[in-house]
Every structure is written in C-alpha cells, then in structure tokens.
Image: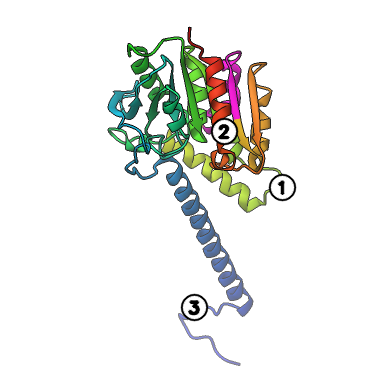
Amino acid sequence: MKADTPGAAPEVPLSRRALRRGLFFLALLGTILAALNFALAWMLVAAMTHPPCRDPVPLKGLPLPVERWLPAADGVEIRVWYYPSQNGAAVITFGGMGGALGERLPPAAFLVEAGYGVLQVDTRACARPPAAVTQGYDERYDGEAALDFLLARPEVEAGRIGAMGFSMGGASALNLAAHRSEIRAVVRDGGFANLGALLAPAEGDSAAMRLHKRTILALYRLRAGVDPWEVSPVDDLKAVAPRPVLLIYGEAEAAAGLAQADAGGANLQLWIVPDGAHGRNHLVAPEAYRRRVLDFFNAALPGD
C-alpha cells in the first residue's frame, strides 16, 4: 500500500477532472457564441443607425439645385437640395439610409422635368452634427423643416405640397404627413410596415435566431434612442387618411404592401410591380413608374 505524502493535495478522480474540463469548454463556447451574437447584432444596428456620409451626385441633365442647411426641431441641421417649382406644386423626397440627394432614390428627375418643385432631404448621417438614422422616426423633424421651407417659398402654393419616399424614406414621408396636414399626398416606394415587427423574432425561428433578433431590438433602442415598434408606417397611414396615398411595391416584397393596404382608407392605391423588387421598381417598369407617379400627383395636387 502506497502511503499518503504528508501535505499533498488529494488526487482528483479522472471522471471529475473530465467533468470540470467539459464544463469549462461549455462555458467558453457559450461566451464565444454570446460575444459573436452581440458583435453581429452590433454591426447590423451600426449599419442601420450610423451609415457613412457620402457625397451625392446632382440629377443629370438638370440645373444645379439650391443647397440649404435647415434647422430641425431636435437641434441638428439637415442638408436639402431644392429644384424650384415651375407649376406651383412641390414634392419633398426622402431616401433610404443614404438620403435622397441627387441621383439617389426615389427618382426625381421626371418630377422636375414636369415642373414640380423637388426638395430632396439628406440623411441624418450627414447632418450637422451627425445624428443617428432612425428609419423614419426622427426624420420627421427633417421633413418638417423642409415643409416649412417650402411654405415660405413664393413660387409654391401651400395646398399643393406632397411627399415621396423610398424604403425608410417612405416611413419618413408617412410620419411627416401623419403629423402635418399640409402634406396633401404621399408616394411610398417599398419598405417595412412596422420596424419592430420586421426586426422581432418570427414564428419558426430557432432559439439562437430568437436571441439574435432580441439583441438587435435592444441595441437598436440603445443606438437610435427610439422604440422600433413606434416606427410604424402602417399606423401612420391611418392618420394620413383620407388623403391620397400611392404605395409602390415590387412583386418580391408584395406582402409588405398588402399589409398596409387596408390602413390607408378609400384613397389609398397599391401598385404591385410585376417582377419588381426593392429599389428596382423604377428600373423594371420605367415608363409605367413615371406615368403612375405623375398621374397621382397631378390628381392629388391640382392647379387652378
């Protein structure tokens, strides 16, 4: 029999050592997965709320716009480009995360060529000082500054101002119209019905995906300072009614358009573009796109 060495630590059985190692590696794996989940969610939310500020390109074949920096109600200054009205009517345009200036969506050259004044609103990523992009919530303040600018212009008739937005810009346009009755008509090209619903876990998601989406929701609230469930174009549509609204959705995202169709009342039009997709509707059906938008604004913002 082997005598115990005085003062030596008792030997740990092999099975217990294996259990400890297994628990250690499980804890390490869990930490790595949690860190990876957080990092991926952080990068996604950063891309949504703090995109880079890029220089825009003016509309081709048209005179250079008037550039202004307008003070928004929440303390930032937003850049706008204005193509003056020739027919007394004007349209405020809102883009995606990169803003609406120049050649960025929504398309605006055909509106200018038809005599409409077009006031393009830049992204909050380029504001002074730069601010979080909130997918259409705080962008309402930029729209109100743009609207007040147009209301002060002698060439613009107060009852003939509309708004048009692409993607999150459509949410901005509807949010503005829901709060300001001077916006008489809205065109929205693509985009979500409710941001919270878009980001939230869906039926059939795995446990890991549910955790990931909940992390995205929490980080969005933190970085944007906005509850994503309150970014809700489908609810804004109810406040805009009965003013005319044209929703343009490609066949690939028709479900989002259909989800909003009943909220806008009798004066809402929904155009599902065959073979269309997000950001491509004006390319898939260019002539029909121009005709529909012009016919809509001509009817909604009539002159004398």
Residue 194 in the image: state x and y as whole percent. Answer: 59, 32
Whole-angstrom CA distance, mark 3 to mark 1, is 52 Å
Q: Disc 3 vs disc 2: which is toward the camera?
A: 2
- Tell me which label, 3 or 1, sits earlier in the chain: 3
Element at badge 2?
Answer: helix
Q: Can residue 280 be seen in this view?
A: yes
Verify whether residue 290 appears in magenta.
Answer: no
For label 3, count other residues whose C-alpha is less than 10 Å away and answer few (under 14), some (14-19) or many (20+): few
Element at badge 1?
Answer: loop
Q: Which amino acid does label 3 sit on?
A: Ala
Q: Is residue 192 visible?
A: no
Residues rendered magenta in the picture:
228-247
- Against 39, is 13 above or below? below
Name the residue rendered at 49%, 30% in the picture. Answer: 165
For the residue pair 13 and 221, the one nearer the viewer reads as: 221
**Residue to which mark 1 is pinned:** 204
Name the residue rendered at 45%, 34% in the picture. Answer: 95
| Rendered image: mark on residue 9 | 3
Q: Which amino acid does label 1 sit on?
A: Gly
Q: Disc 1 vs disc 2: which is toward the camera?
A: 2
Element at badge 3?
Answer: loop
| Rendered image: mark on residue 226 | none
**Residue to which mark 2 is pinned:** 289
- Against 20, is 96 above or below? above
